[in-house]
């Protein structure tokens, strides 16, 4: 049945992440976010596109663009099935949702859910641990992996039958001051759905960004200015608190650092209790000092907005999308000595995005008077999203059969898509919202056998041969050991009829081939050992070296043994009819025979061959002759 992906959000855009994936009939919703750049119907995913019921919802982390629509989906739309997220995400998500609701009310915006809806929604959530195997119903299995990004963020592995995939959510391949890098096991995957926020960007090193950040903040406060850092209360705020706390201590600075909301205070309490999700450095130093006990970072009161003197203020929400951060910005923006520091990506449509792109020079105050934007603004990437290199590194590690890009900007996604397809040879998709992508998956079936084949497997079929003997081209004085081989399995021929399969003995081929399937072509293969030293001596005498020189020797040998056939040397392989033969470098080749004696395992080279059914007798004759002559 394969995998089908319906993109309800984050398709060729950043915001309202939501992808419904059907794996062999089982349907999962990954993330249920809102778009902070919209205030109309575009804010939420279009849930009407879902055709049928869901088996579960999995939330990757607590950011609003990944969880913001969940209370609306459960309490208004009416979803009542299983919901999974990590323990930190379940603890911190309600804080983000309630704070968002508070800011919306303050702006006079009516949302589609209430505080009671948030409470009811979170009661339906089942928290999960990393690498915990979760069985959903009879067939669906999910497992969470550490994603970095923010506390509790997870990448999600899902498997149904023979089809499997990973949905990354947001992740970071680089460790920071309080979180580790993303970690995942090597997996065999049909599909990876990955974020692509920084699809074409290779960011500066963390240390370079930190130096630029600290210099900009230091220069501003020393000159008597105020620094506004619009950031969400969870995630980047704690990262930058740690950075400034350390710098203030080293430089003995007395300028106050403020944070704006009780939400941050609550978040810091959770961060102190969820130390197992932080990086190793934080864990190692916990006995001496909790990294989230801040000496220089104190609470802020609105009455201090226009207080004289320098200060640094962390105000939520991020991206200047409303609330206190926008209120303070309107007060501080007209002064040239002040600085607005944007520490991460700002979604299109927000004031932060317009400011970062240089498109914001004026702003209307609440009384409709114009505000001139004269303050300095710096946009540094302290984003916890992985960059282009990190995306490629993850895909190289997982080596999936297909890739789907979400959570990115269309032009940059197109560039990354071409890079993945041309550089890695992996089919890549970048669908828009409402788009559907269908992915084929591997299918394993149980094969029945005919009586003749079953009987042949029960009877010994040993054959004796020497690893090397004198031949027309090669000769050696080395005493050749006897080899015992058993090739009963090579006599199995697999016939597929829709969803059924059966193994057939080769002697039954004429009977079966006389039916409707007579025109079908069946491909077989075998990988067998020969002594390397014999080939090396022969190529040496001819003044040759390397795999291609071995093929030249083999071509001469086959031309001598089969004078009535045309042996074609294609460079990397030999071809006789449909029969192809090459030197096999793959140590785990599925065609490989295990009949090489243990004491000669390191002195043998494997030859890999394939052929169609009509050339089976020729193929077996060539294999036998090569093995006996080399």
Image: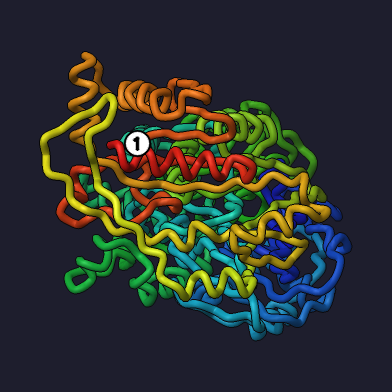
Does the rendering let one see residue 378?
A: no
The residue that label 1 is drawn on is 205
SS at mark 1 in the image? loop
User: Closer to the camera, 507 or 42?
Assistant: 507
* Residue 527, image x, y percentages: 41, 46
Give above or below for 377 relative to 498: above
* Residue 80, image x, y percentages: 76, 82
Taking the spot 34% from the left edge, 72% from the top edge, the residue there is: 276
For disc 1, the neighbor class at 10 Å (few under 14, some 14 to 19, many from 20) is few
User: Closer to the camera, 494 or 389?
Assistant: 494
Give above or below for 22 relative to 330: below
Give above or below for 513 relative to 160: above
Determine the residue located farthest toward the top in the rendered image: 543
User: Closer to the camera, 586 or 465?
Assistant: 465
Taking the spot 18% from the left edge, 34% from the top edge, the residue there is: 533
- State which quarter of the image contains the N terminus: bottom right
- State which quarter of the image contains the C terminus: top left
* Residue 176, image x, y percentages: 35, 51
* Residue 282, image x, y percentages: 27, 63
């Amino acid at each position: 049945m394969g995998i089908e992906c319906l993109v309800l959000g984050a398709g060729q855009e950043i915001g309202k992440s939501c992808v419904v994936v059907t794996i062999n009939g089982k349907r999962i919703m990954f993330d249920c976010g809102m778009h902070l750049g919209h205030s109309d119907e575009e804010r939420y995913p279009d849930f009407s596109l879902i055709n049928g019921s869901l088996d579960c919802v999995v939330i990757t982390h607590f950011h609003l663009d990944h969880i913001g629509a969940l209370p609306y989906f459960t309490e208004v739309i009416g979803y009542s099935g299983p919901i999974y997220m990590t323990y930190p995400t379940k603890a911190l998500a309600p804080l983000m949702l309630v704070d968002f609701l508070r800011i919306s009310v303050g702006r006079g915006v009516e949302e589609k859910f209430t505080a009671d809806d948030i409470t009811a929604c979170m009661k339906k959530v089942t928290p999960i641990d990393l690498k915990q195997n979760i069985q959903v119903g009879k067939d669906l299995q999910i497992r969470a992996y550490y994603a970095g990004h923010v506390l509790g963020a997870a990448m999600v592995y899902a498997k149904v039958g023979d089809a499997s995939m990973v949905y990354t959510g947001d992740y970071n391949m680089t460790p920071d001051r309080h979180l580790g890098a993303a970690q995942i096991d090597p997996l065999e995957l049909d599909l990876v759905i990955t974020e692509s926020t920084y699809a074409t960007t290779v960011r500066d090193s963390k240390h370079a960004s930190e130096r630029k950040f600290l210099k900009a903040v230091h220069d501003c406060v020393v000159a008597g200015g105020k620094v506004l850092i619009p950031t969400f209360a969870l995630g980047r705020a704690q990262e930058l608190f740690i950075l400034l706390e350390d710098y203030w201590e080293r430089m003995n600075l007395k300028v106050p650092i403020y944070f704006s909301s009780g939400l941050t205070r609550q978040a810091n309490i959770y961060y102190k209790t969820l130390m197992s999700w932080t990086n190793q450095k934080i864990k190692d130093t916990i006995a001496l000092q909790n990294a989230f006990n801040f000496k220089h970072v104190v609470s802020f009161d609105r009455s201090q907005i226009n207080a004289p003197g320098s200060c640094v203020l962390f105000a939520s929400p991020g991206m200047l999308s409303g609330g206190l951060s926008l209120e303070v910005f309107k007060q501080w923006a007209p002064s040239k000595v002040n600085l607005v520091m944007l520490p991460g990506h700002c979604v299109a449509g927000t004031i932060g995005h317009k400011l970062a792109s240089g498109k914001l020079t004026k702003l209307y105050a609440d009384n409709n008077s114009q505000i001139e934007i004269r303050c300095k603004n710096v946009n540094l990437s302290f984003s916890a999203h992985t960059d282009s290199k990190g995306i490629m590194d993850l895909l190289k590690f997982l080596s999936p059969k297909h890739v789907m890009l979400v959570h990115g900007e269309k032009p940059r996604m197109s560039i990354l898509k071409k890079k993945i397809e041309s550089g890695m040879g992996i089919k890549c998709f970048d669908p828009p919202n409402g788009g559907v992508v269908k992915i084929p998956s591997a299918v394993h079936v149980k094969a029945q056998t005919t009586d003749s084949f079953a009987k042949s497997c029960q009877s010994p079929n040993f054959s004796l041969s020497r690893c090397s003997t004198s031949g027309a081209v090669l000769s050696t004085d080395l005493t050749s050991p006897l080899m015992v081989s058993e090739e009963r399995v090579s006599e199995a021929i697999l016939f597929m009829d829709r969803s059924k399969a059966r193994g057939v003995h080769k002697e039954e081929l004429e009977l079966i081939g006389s039916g409707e399937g007579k025109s079908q072509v069946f491909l077989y293969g075998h990988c067998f050992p020969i002594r390397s030293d014999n080939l090396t001596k022969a190529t040496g005498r001819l003044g040759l070296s390397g795999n291609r020189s071995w093929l030249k020797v083999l071509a001469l040998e086959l031309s001598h043994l089969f004078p009535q056939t045309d042996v074609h040397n294609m460079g990397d392989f030999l071809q006789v009819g449909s029969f192809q033969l090459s030197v096999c470098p793959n140590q785990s080749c599925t065609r490989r025979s295990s009949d090489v004696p243990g004491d000669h395992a390191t002195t043998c080279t494997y030859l890999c061959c394939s052929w169609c059914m009509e050339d089976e007798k020729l193929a077996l004759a060539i294999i036998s002759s090569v093995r006996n002559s080399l």
